């Protein structure tokens, strides 16, 4: 009998990567997506939320509550910095989306608000310095792979925060560092 091929990343991360990249492919083929918070980063939040729902069997209502959490992180970024790649580079676009996904994941797994913000800050810290760098005239080519990296970063940051490791740099300060 044939053996099922398994990925190196594990089921949750493998699904999150697949969903995140599929969203960008849908966008590239002129399909309908929801910018979350931008078209170039639109796969990260839904990709991770869909994977979390399948892996942990969260209800739609639980996912909706987590999306409110993600929206609050996005709002803070819009109010205090930017999510636009043209203004803040990929660190703003993919970084903020990954922060949104990390915070929502922490909430889904029972974390408190401080842990949510700690995870969001950790993600952004891990992505500082990423520029928006079109390749071959394709604006979103780097975004495709960075959406996959973004969900991985979000999962890692959520795990760190939920393990009790305190983030020393508050999310607001991290946004400020990104925006400067």
Image (cartoon, grey):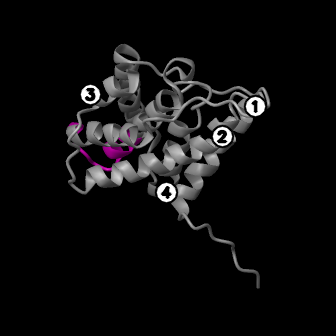
Report x, y in % for residue 31.
Answer: 75, 28
Residue 80 shown in magenta: no
Q: Is residue 112 above or below residue 55?
A: above
- Give the distance between the C-alpha atoms of the residues marked 4 and 1, in whole angstroms: 27 Å
- Dots 3 and 4: beta carbons under 8 Å? no
Classify 10 Å Cα crowding around label 1: few (below 14), some (14-19), many (20 and above).
some
In the structure shown, which secondary structural element does the residue marked by tag 4 occupy? helix
Residues rendered magenta in the picture: 102-113
How far apart in space, not on screen, are marks 2 and 4 (Cα)?
Answer: 23 Å
Foreground disc of the pair 3, 4? 3
Q: CA distance from mark 3 to mark 2?
A: 28 Å
Query: Count the marks: how many?
Result: 4
| Other residues around mark 4 within 10 Å, as few (<14) / some (14–19) / many (≥20) | few
Q: Secondary structure at mark 3?
A: helix
In the rendered image, which quarter is residue 63 located in? top left
Residue at image coords 32%, 37%: 121
Q: Earlier in the sequence, mark 1 or mark 2?
A: 1
170 vs 110, nearest the viewer: 170
**Residue on which the image places disc 2:** 144
For the residues bearing labels 1 and 2, Cβ distance under 8 angstroms: yes
| Nearer to us: label 4 or label 1 | 1
Considering only order in the chain, which callout, 3 or 1, is on the residue closer to the N terminus? Answer: 1
Dot 2: within a 10 Å radius of its alpha carbon, few (fewer than 14), some, or many (20 or more) residues?
many
- Residue at left offset 52%, top offset 53%: 54
**Outermost bottom residue:** 1
Disc nearer the start of the sequence (3/2): 2
Q: Residue at x 53, y 39 (%)?
A: 44
Q: Which mark is residue 28?
A: 1
Disc sitting over residue 173 in the figure: 3
The residue at which mark 4 appears reads as 55
């Amino acid at each position: 009998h044939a053996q099922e091929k398994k990925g190196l990343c594990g089921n949750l991360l493998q699904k999150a990567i697949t969903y995140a990249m599929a969203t960008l492919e849908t966008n590239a083929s002129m399909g309908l997506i929801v910018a979350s918070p931008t078209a170039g980063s639109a796969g990260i939040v839904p990709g991770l939320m869909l994977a979390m729902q399948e892996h942990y069997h969260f209800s739609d209502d639980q996912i909706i509550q987590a999306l409110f959490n993600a929206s609050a992180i996005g709002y803070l970024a819009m109010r205090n910095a930017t999510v636009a790649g043209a203004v803040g580079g990929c660190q703003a676009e993919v970084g903020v989306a990954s922060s949104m996904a990390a915070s929502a994941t922490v909430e889904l797994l029972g974390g408190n608000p401080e842990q949510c913000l700690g995870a969001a800050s950790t993600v952004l810290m891990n992505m500082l310095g990423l520029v928006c760098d079109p390749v071959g005239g394709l604006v979103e080519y780097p975004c495709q792979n960075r959406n996959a990296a973004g969900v991985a970063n979000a999962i890692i940051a959520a795990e760190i925060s939920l393990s009790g490791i305190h983030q020393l740099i508050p999310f607001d300060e991290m946004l400020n560092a990104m925006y400067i």
